Image: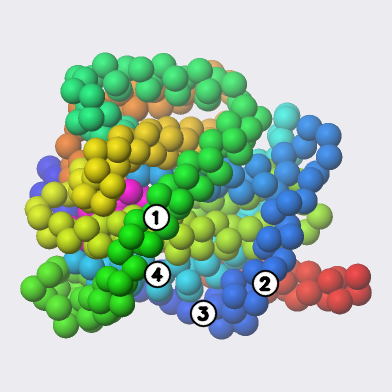
Amino acid sequence: MFELLNIINDYLWTHIVITLLVFCALYFTFRLKGVQFSRIGDMLRVIVEKPGGQKIGSFHAFAVSLSSRVGTGNLAGVASAIFVGGPGAVFWMWMMALFGAATAFVEATLAQLYKRRGEDSFYGGPAYYMQHGLHRKWMGVLFAVLITITFGMANQIVQSNTLCGALADSFAIDAKWIGLTITIATLIIIFGGIRRISHFASIVVPFMAIGYVIIAVIVILMNITEIPAMIVLIVKSAFGLEQAVGGAFGMAVMQGVKRGLFSNEAGEGSAPNAAAIAHTSHPVKQGLLQSLGVFTDTIVVCTCTAFIILLSGIYDSGRDGIILTKYALEHHIGPAGGLFVTAAIFLFAYSTIIANYFYGETNIRFITQKMSYINLFRIITGATVMAGAMMSLQEAWSIVDLAMGVMTIVNLVAIIQLSPKAFFLLRNYIAQKKEG
């Protein structure tokens, strides 16, 4: 079954997904005049705006989306990309982030434009702009089903698998008992609703991201003289000029784009679900913040992992996933490095499990408002987290790649058609800024 999934995934990604992602990234960057580069100052100002009262503000929405972005993809995903595609995969991850941030801007802005008010917060996302923007409810329902499967089930398997694997390797505990503990902890949070989820994310995400970046900076400073050679290695490998140390050119591109998308989610249609919950004075503000989220995820956190692995010199040792990242950090700072990676993957993966659940709930609410179905999904989420503890990493990736690929295609087709709305809103935002 998994061999068949891999064949389907290779065709889907090689011929359809990568083509659409690259087209959208370049087209939106051109039409928006490089908004992801020219409006960085606005991004930083928006993130500190406070909505007042008990409303969910821009920072909370940003934290929810970032808690989904900053997860196992940043530690295990980057390591797997280097393991399969060589150091060059890092270069293509950077390219997709720099230009894909424009795609993230478009989908998040549209999510704000077409959001709807729920009982205790706003709800929105691709399913909503497909119904209310394109007037195609069937397309919205299709996307809602796809994202619920992708994030509510498939992605949870990877997060749980990586989390349980790291803890089991460090503390010699049976993975099933770790899985059971994580399942119970997940159910406690998700039965608390979106406010509990958003406040949980706003506390955990900054803490874990900043701590990880600090460790990476220390490693970089320890190996500062090796940086130029490492950059040359990445670039040469990206274009197939260093085949002795990694995959061929096509594999480097494929792994860089696939694992980059899994991590930063630009164009996938997931982050707009978080962007829609914010109370903000203009839709473009969430578009800007989600672009910043892509930069934070890939250019900062993923790069930290890549540098830790490549500077260790053991990236071609045959290790894969989180185990490669763990041993690479141990190489730099000793046994404490392994314990730090274990703690980081716990925070990264657990917060991502919570955010992934929220994406699923948002889209189930699009299909039905019955709490019985939502509670059933909460139970299924717990069961999926438990199942992830029992699977292998490559089996988990096969399921995620298929679900993520199909979901991304549907979302990109929608935002290409609705993008003139986002272009207009950006012009309106700039005009209002000029008028004070």
Q: Amino acid at mark 4?
A: Trp
Tag 2 secondary structure: loop
- Asked if the residue under mark 2 is in contact with the one under mark 4, i.e. CB atoms within 8 Å, the reply is no
Identify residue for label 4: 94
Observer-side mark, 2 or 3, equals 2
* The residue stretch that appears in magenta: 73-83
Disc 3 is placed on an element classified as: helix
**What colour scheme has been applied to the protein in the rendered image?**
rainbow
Amino acid on which the number 3 mark rests in the picture: Tyr
- What element does badge 4 sit on? helix
Q: Is residue 417 left or right of residue 86?
A: right
Mark nearest the camera among 4 and 1 is: 1
- Kind of residue at disc 2: Arg
Name the residue tied to disc 2: 39
* Residue on which the image places disc 3: 27
Mark positioned earlier in the residue sequence (2 or 1): 2
**Mark 2 Cα shell of 10 Å, populated few (<14), some (14-19), many (≥20):** few
Q: CA distance from mark 3 to mark 1?
A: 38 Å
Marks 2 and 1: which is nearer the front? 1
Which is nearer the N-term, disc 2 or disc 3? Answer: 3
Q: Are marks 2 and 3 in contact (CB under 8 Å)?
A: no
